[in-house]
């Protein structure tokens, strides 16, 4: 089946199926509420960010991009009416880290006439998509490996497109008067990596394509957030933008050089076809330990099935959305330092030796450069911003890296009275951010750059931005 015919089939099936059915004071970190008499507006924008042929995927996959199965996109908006304009952008990329994350935020801030703190950038984390890290790539340049992690000129082009799109969108912002909130259960997608073996041993071995293994397919779902949440913005009774968020790794199959936004991007496109006048945005929730592994064997048919299940959940969340008057856009942010890993392979000396080991695999040298870039960022004292947009009846909060789903559930418990939408994969240098319980279960991975003790700092940051009250 031709790839674009496959995409058309996915969209058609989806339409038919859905038709059927901390170190700073609060004074420094937090932004005060604004007058409820101010006008609010939203300026949505979208750009193509598809990597070129020959670009590396996921930062370390051996097979570089060979074919564009479907495009990679960036969707976002600029909110106005608060203390400063706020930018939110979701990228069909695997990760944006360290200096590259700064580059995106600084450029978007300048375009929207705001500051870096008010810019929320996240990745959806598809694996047949790029990882960008300007600091790591500079380290690789010095080691004789230019453009091996990513192509800096390509990222610069994508940033320029996003800047131009923001500037164009701000010429005609859309008034917004109401906020919409809706959530619906998504069936047969999410399952936790954590499984308990027959001998009682705990394992985090249930990856994204584990469904062909009878043990993994029969094991319980484990800890997940089963709901897709939809936060929408309305002008009177007319919807303008819908932001959908669901916590799962967004991979059906990957690693063969077939670039794709995968089932989450395909579901977003189905919803865009169904509601052409409502800009559809999708963001991945906190899902470092959540995959489709129980329900996915890596086949092309499973990609179609996962696409339609997610699109169905998004449609149901939209169907039961409740519309409420928008009375405030309050922005808060706190700064958080996460402890760097104490693993002996992640010392400055070990990482430097690995980077310059010309007999090692290129992919291992890239991973070492990413680790060294992150280590130096922590040692330089550069914190992670944890922002929250408070709409009164709902909050949108962004967390870094591959935060485990426990943090998303934690955010909801901190504000049980409200509609909390938690997005993951912001600043991605930490890689996995396990909970205290997962560290106790001895979770380990090469994509883990933080140490035990991270949960306390994540909890403090969430409590600060979610529970803060005006005087």
Image: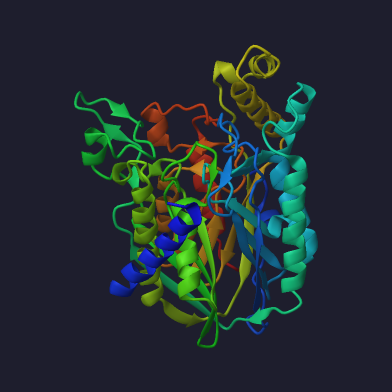
Query: Residue farthest to the front?
Result: 1
Front residue (pair 264, 323): 264
Front residue (pair 213, 355): 213
Q: Is residue 200 at least partly visible in the picture?
A: yes
Residue occupying image coordinates x 72% and y 60%:
162
Horizontally, residue 190 falls left or right of residue 93, namely left
User: In the image, residue 455 lies at what x, y percent?
Assistant: 48, 39
Q: Is residue 400 at least partly visible in the picture?
A: no
Q: Is residue 423 above or below residue 367?
A: below
User: In the image, residue 5 lies at what x, y percent?
Assistant: 46, 58
Residue occupying image coordinates x 64% and y 57%:
120
Residue occupying image coordinates x 66% and y 61%:
47
* Count of numbered tags: 0
Front residue (pair 444, 436): 444
Locate residue 438: give its quadrant. top left
Locate residue 347: give its quadrant. top right
User: In the image, residue 348 lies at what x, y percent?
Assistant: 68, 19
């Amino acid at each position: 089946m031709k790839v674009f015919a496959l995409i058309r089939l996915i969209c058609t099936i989806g339409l038919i199926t859905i038709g059927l059915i901390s170190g700073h004071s609060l004074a420094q970190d937090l932004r005060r509420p604004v007058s409820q008499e101010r006008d609010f507006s939203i300026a949505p924008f979208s750009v193509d960010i598809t990597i070129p042929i020959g670009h590396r995927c996921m930062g370390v996959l051996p097979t570089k991009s060979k074919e564009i199965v479907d495009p990679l996109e960036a969707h976002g908006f600029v909110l106005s009416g608060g203390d400063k304009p706020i930018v939110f952008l979701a990228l069909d990329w695997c990760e944006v880290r360290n200096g590259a994350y700064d580059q995106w935020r600084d450029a978007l801030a300048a375009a929207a006439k705001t500051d870096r703190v008010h810019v929320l950038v996240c990745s959806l984390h598809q694996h047949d998509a790029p990882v960008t890290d300007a600091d790591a790539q500079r380290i690789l340049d010095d080691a004789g490996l230019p453009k091996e992690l990513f192509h800096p000129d390509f990222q610069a082009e994508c940033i320029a497109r996003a800047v131009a799109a923001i500037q164009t969108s701000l010429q005609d912002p859309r008034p917004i008067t109401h906020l919409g909130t809706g959530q619906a259960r998504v069936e047969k997608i999410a399952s936790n990596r954590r499984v308990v073996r027959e001998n009682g041993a705990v394992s985090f071995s249930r990856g994204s394509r584990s469904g062909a293994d009878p043990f993994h397919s029969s094991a319980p779902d484990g800890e997940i957030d089963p709901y897709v949440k939809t936060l929408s913005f309305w002008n009177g009774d007319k919807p303008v933008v819908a932001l959908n968020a669901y916590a799962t790794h967004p991979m059906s199959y990957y690693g063969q050089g077939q670039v794709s936004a995968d089932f989450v991007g395909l579901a977003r496109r189905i919803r865009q076809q169904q509601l052409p006048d409502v800009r559809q945005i999708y963001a991945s929730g906190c899902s470092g330990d959540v995959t489709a592994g129980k329900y996915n064997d890596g086949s092309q048919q499973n990609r179609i099935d996962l696409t339609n299940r997610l699109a169905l959940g998004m449609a149901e969340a939209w169907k039961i959305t409740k519309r409420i008057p928008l009375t405030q856009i309050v922005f808060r942010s706190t700064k958080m330092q996460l402890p760097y890993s104490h693993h002996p392979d992640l010392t400055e000396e070990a990482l430097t030796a690995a980077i310059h080991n010309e007999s090692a695999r290129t992919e291992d040298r890239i991973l070492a450069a990413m680790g060294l870039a992150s280590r130096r960022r922590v040692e330089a004292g550069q914190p992670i911003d944890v922002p929250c947009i408070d709409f009164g009846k709902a909050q949108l909060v962004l967390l870094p890296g591959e935060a485990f789903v426990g943090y998303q559930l934690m955010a909801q418990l901190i504000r049980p009275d409200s509609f909390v939408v938690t997005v993951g994969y912001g600043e991605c240098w930490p890689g996995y951010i396990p909970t205290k319980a997962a560290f106790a279960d001895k979770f380990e991975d090469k994509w883990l750059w933080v140490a035990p003790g991270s949960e306390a700092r994540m909890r403090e940051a969430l409590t600060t931005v979610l529970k803060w009250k005006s005087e």
